Image (tube, rainbow, N blue to C red):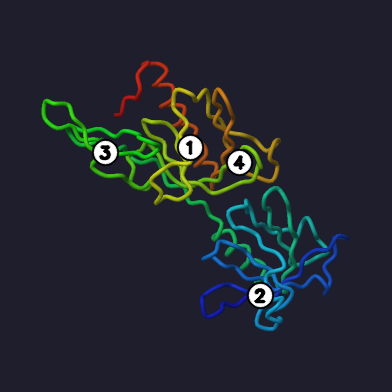
Amino acid sequence: MAQRDIEGRLYGTLILEDDNHKFVKKGERFFLLDLKEGRLKLYYDRPDRLPKTSNSPCQEIQLNFISKVSDARKVRPKAGNCFCITHAGDQIYIQATSEKEMQYWIDELNEACKITVPIAQTPTLAPGNSRYEVAGGVINLMQESGDSGEESVEHNMPALSLPSYMSGYAVKQGAVRKNWKKRYFVLDTNGLSYFKHDQDKEPIKTIPLTDIQDARLVEGQHHPHRQNLFEVVTTDRTFNIQCDSRTDSESWVSHINKFAKQVITSHVGSPDIH
């Protein structure tokens, strides 16, 4: 039965499906949901029962790679209380001791992996006699002093505090390794930027609005195990991004297209803000 340790971490013994699609005693693993480290850890037994030389996890699953956790009883009808974890394109089938325990793990894992993309924000303008400007990948508030036109950097801001049309977490596919990682996205006058964390001041990359050709929803033919996908098409690359819900994906697509087209139509560096 699923329980919690003194640190509040969920744990319990479950059975992994073997290569013959069977659930046997040999497949028992001790599962530990570690939210602090962002991982689901699997052990051959309780860590406190294992020798110190072999009490490391036998398998770890990064939570930001998990796209869905679902009831798999229809897929594995003979397994009973079976659920499925879809991560990085792979599927793992797991058997619980009861329907209640199965559903508890499904709910807890889905909650732990939730992307939580907020709704579009009302843009915040720079104060009078100032403007926001990107310098070396960092967004700064530039202050103009009097008639001299001289500028000074007042302060840098974390991604969470940046003025934006829309911002929030989503999962993006990498360009080289094709793995999926959680990133914080900000859509503003500079373009679509993504950061490793919402407290970072320097984006990993900014896609200028002028480079964006289209943003559109993607059905499951290219990524059958991932839902709520959209892609941003640029002159050099197509970015695949996954949201927590279809509504979030539709909102991102709508906002990206709206402001990218404003730039193209107006032929200026930043879209009109209403």
Structural distance between the alpha carbons of marks 2 and 4:
33 Å
Residue 155 position, x and y percent, is 26, 44
Structural distance between the alpha carbons of marks 3 and 2:
50 Å
Mark in front: 3 vs 2: 3
Q: Which residue has dot 2 on it?
A: 12
Q: Which residue has dot 3 on it?
A: 141
Structural distance between the alpha carbons of marks 4 and 1:
12 Å
Q: What amino acid is found at the position of numbered circle 4 in the picture? A: Gly
Q: Residues within 10 Å of mark 2 (few under 14, many from 20)?
A: some
Q: Which residue has dot 4 on it?
A: 174
Q: What amino acid is found at the position of numbered circle 1 in the picture? A: Lys
Q: Secondary structure at mark 4?
A: loop
Residue 17 position, x and y percent, is 80, 63
Q: Is residue 195 left or right of residue 49?
A: left
Q: Secondary structure at mark 2?
A: strand
**Residue, x 25% and y 32% (percent of image)?**
131
The image quarter in which residue 174 lies = top right
Q: Vertically, is 197 above or below 12?
A: above
Q: Residue furthest right?
A: 20
